[in-house]
Image (cartoon, helix red, strand yellow):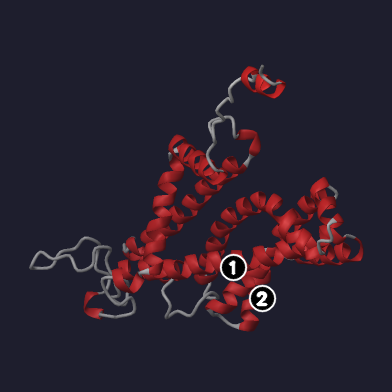
Amino acid sequence: METQLEHSEKTQPPPVPVAIGRPPQASAWRRARHSLLRARWPIVAIIILLIATLFAVFGPQVSPKDPNRQNLMLRLTAPFTRDEAGAMDFPLGTDALGRDVLSRLIYGARVSLAVGVTAVVIGGFLGTSLGMMAGYFGGKIDDMIMRIADIQLAFPFILLTIMVLVVLGPGVVNLVLVLGIGQWVTYARIARGQTISHREKEYVEAARCIGARHWQIMFKSIFPNIVAPLIVIASFNVASVILAEASLSFLGLGVPPTVPTWGGMLAESRDQLLGGSWWLAVFPGLAIMLTVLALNILGDWVRDFLDPRLRGVGF
């Protein structure tokens, strides 16, 4: 006679196989790839940014000539001009001092992208840290940080930058510091608002109950939940910083004239435009426009991709 245990084992239905889902990271990569293929334009933007990044990183290797080498005998050579042997030594022409425009464009990508990315990293780190402190602790700390932000916003950014650079002098380091410090207010306001909305939630209370310290709660519990809007703002800020660097270099307040920059090339082309040397302004202008446009398109895609309300609508 079967025991009751054996009878229950026989009557129990067979186990249903459970499908093991993809890891969260694999699912996120799959969703990102599907979103890129669906949107298409962000793929073009990524290609443009990859080309600019390769020029910036491997500038000395891919540059055909020394960007500062002068040859007055070949000054203002038009683009695509071939010599007697049929060779094209200067595909994009030369400037008023006989320097290769293509080489200067390649080297200019190094300054523009380096300044843009570094300034955004500095401003993002400083602003996010101060904003999270203001939102988490509140009280006098919040009032002090936000009043400093209000004072900075009371001054026009470009005028404040020009004033500081006139005092400190032109240079890549000074330019990065000024542009980076000038970006922190945006990150601080967003981080503060997001931290205020998260600091009283259950997972934060649970972290407090197990004895987590304040910095652990802020940067290990709250920060991963507020990083999405900060990434979106950073993608747009890189474009705005590149434009600011080009504007300051155009005014002669960015980097020294011996360092090739896109804004400096535009400034040097002013005296040659009336003489018909259109390429001196067109090519650096196109480089700035395509880079900023690619960053804005990629920023739009990042915003839509990280928006949880759009995850079921083709993303």
Q: Which label sits in the foreground, 2 or 1?
A: 1
Q: Position of residue 219 (x, y in %)?
A: 72, 60
Residue sitting at x 21%, y 79%: 73
204 sits left or right of 281 in the view: right
Q: What is the three-letter code of the residue carrying label 1?
A: Ala
Residue position for label 2: 163
Q: Position of residue 14 (x, y in %)?
A: 58, 22
Residue position for label 1: 119
Q: What is the three-letter code of the residue carrying label 2?
A: Met
Q: Is residue 286 visible?
A: no
Residue sitting at x 84%, y 61%: 211
12 sits left or right of 64 in the view: right
The image quadrant where one finds the N terminus is: top right
Q: Nearer the viewer, residue 57 or 272?
A: 57
Q: Position of residue 229 (x, y in %)?
A: 66, 49
Q: Position of residue 273 (x, y in %)?
A: 37, 64
